Amino acid sequence: MAGESYTAELNKAGANISGFFGEAGFLARQYPLGAIGAVILTLFVFAAIFADFITRFDPLSTNAAMSLAKPGGEHILGADFMGRDVYSRLVYGARISLAVSLTATAIGSVLGVAIGLTAGYLGGWVDLLTQRVTDIMQALPLLVLALVMSASLGPSLQTTIIAISIPLVPYSARVIRSNTLALREMAMVEAAKAVGMSEWRIAIRHVLPNTIAPLIVLATAQLGSTILTEASLSFLGLGVPEPYPSWGRMLSESAAEYIRTAPWLVIFPGVVISLVVFGTNLLGDALRDILDPRQRG
Amino acid sequence: MTPIIEVTDLKKHYPVRKGLLRRQVGTVFAVDGVSFSINEGETLGLVGESGCGKSTVARTVLRLIEPSGGSIMLDGRDINALSRSEMRPVRREMQIIFQDPFSSLNPRMRAGAIVGEVLEVHGLTRGQETKARVAELFQQVGLRPAQMANFPHQFSGGQRQRICIARALALNPKLIVCDEPVSALDVSIQAQVINLMMDLQRDKKLSYLFITHDLAVVEHISHRVAVMYLGRIVEYADKRTLFTNPLHPYTEALLSAVPVPNPRLKRTKRILQGDVPSPMRPPSGCPFHTRCPYVMERCKVDVPRLQKIAPGHLVSCHKHEA
């Protein structure tokens, strides 16, 4: 009956902005800061993927003659004590650092969401059990927990990721659980039950999407801290093994020794880490708003 | 005429637990033996003050809360005995509209999807078919189909309640439980929503269990009225009888509290003294005796039964017992 007229009206209302680029362009204009964050992150991701094409030196090859070479000249960003090109190491390091921090945060968030949602929605003994385990985990500092885990698993890329992600779980689980507790009592959940929807569907379709905003804020904050945790682990010899470049280790190894004599060894990894953390925060802020229909007007 | 729904002796008791061992230290008698029936195309108004158990009745009738006792016959079938999975198809027969239209719609779903989801969960329609049906429902409740693309926050309170009505109508239910559907709305909007609900009732032969504390609304929409006090029905009559000849002292007090838009009219107001007693420790005898102006010795001991005084007029009060 109202077939044509309502689709026509729908289009007029601008609800059907079509195509990925149409939507992305629209959003970029609405959230310029978020777009900057996205660009920064995309640049790093591209650098990581195309590292072979944008560097001249092997990040692992040493050259005694070039030890502690100044920036400029052949080595754009200088060279370290063993004469390895800082720029190459940063570009290749993006692979490891981004892989570690993105996967660790993703794993931590997914596990946290699963645990928090189940605990909050089901309540009862499930809630009690998960919350006490969470208490125990949160009683230990993040780094100590990661240390214990990577020490017992042995140093490798995979164990580093696991060691960093598991300690993150309690934080996202707490956030999701507390939100779920509040949402579970809302009339929209009762309405869904009255319709006869399954508990699964209610939890996934009605509760979960409404808990996403604080999770994104948390995850972007964690993204930065995972890079630093990885740095600490690598510095202690428990993270990504030598000689593979990781931003964190580049920073922590040189910080004490070379801050006066060869500051570029400290400054450039620091700048890169800060940029990535800054970029994810900008993007996360925008994402939170974009994913909340109330903020879109 | 057989009733659409017949509720007999419905009870909901909440245990109160305390201490390390979770020992039961008391019971809240939220609903304590409520019986009523609603015919096709009829509205039963359920009135009473806050905390008297109206909303608990609404939720137990739909089995959103498990009743502690009693039977709920929907179309001649006791749904209180059904399991969760057996309830699913039955849920198509009865729906609910909530008081707060702001918390009853998922803020992250478009209005059309909120209504359409109900159809698809029950496998009634799919894809384009769903869209067309939702558009039809939107028109029936006085919304434009184009508004299907909007999010809940883009609607006013009245419009949101219309979405809730559309969602309730989607499954073609026979009974809609309305839990104070207009008390969160402006008075002018209340009238629009109530008139919409009355039109829909006439067109679709819907039955309503209409819960409210607003007697003016009850007088407008109901055919029959049940007055609740402390988890029990104290008076049950058709609308005209109840409003012209209230017999229970509590009903009398409620009616005298309704504002009349005539400042010159002199009325005797009966203002109740004291508070509603705790449903954890209901008074002995008649639950109303602590506040009743006509209290007798007997009221403190004997529990009055809900008795038929005249055809279709039930009262639970010793003063009116034969």
Image (cartoon, coloured by chain):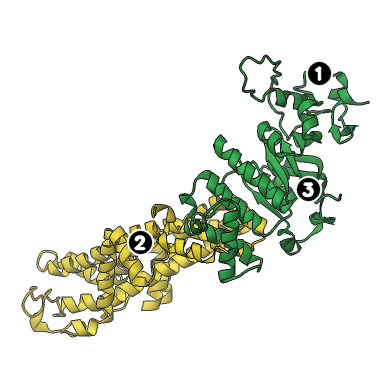
Chain colours: A yellow, B green
Q: Amino acid at mark 3?
A: Ser
- The chain to which mark 2 is attached is A
How many other residues sit within 10 Å of disc 2, few (<14), some (14-19) or many (≥20)? many
* Quadrant (top left/top right/bottom left/bottom right) for the C terminus of chain B: top right
Measured from the top left, where is residue B220 in percent x and y?
A: 69, 36
- The chain to which mark 1 is attached is B
Instruction: Classify mark 3: helix, strand or loop.
Output: loop
Check residue B87 in the rendering and tell me which mark sits there, or answer none. none
- The chain to which mark 3 is attached is B
Kindly give the residue lying farthest to the right in the view shown. B322
Q: Amino acid at mark 1?
A: Tyr
Residue to which mark 1 is pinned: B294
Measured from the top left, where is residue A16 in percent x and y?
A: 42, 65
Measured from the top left, where is residue A113 in percent x and y?
A: 49, 63
Residue to which mark 2 is pinned: A220
x 63%, y 68%: residue = B125
x 25%, y 67%: residue = A40
Residue to which mark 3 is pinned: B68
Between label 1 and label 2, give the one nearer the viewer: 1
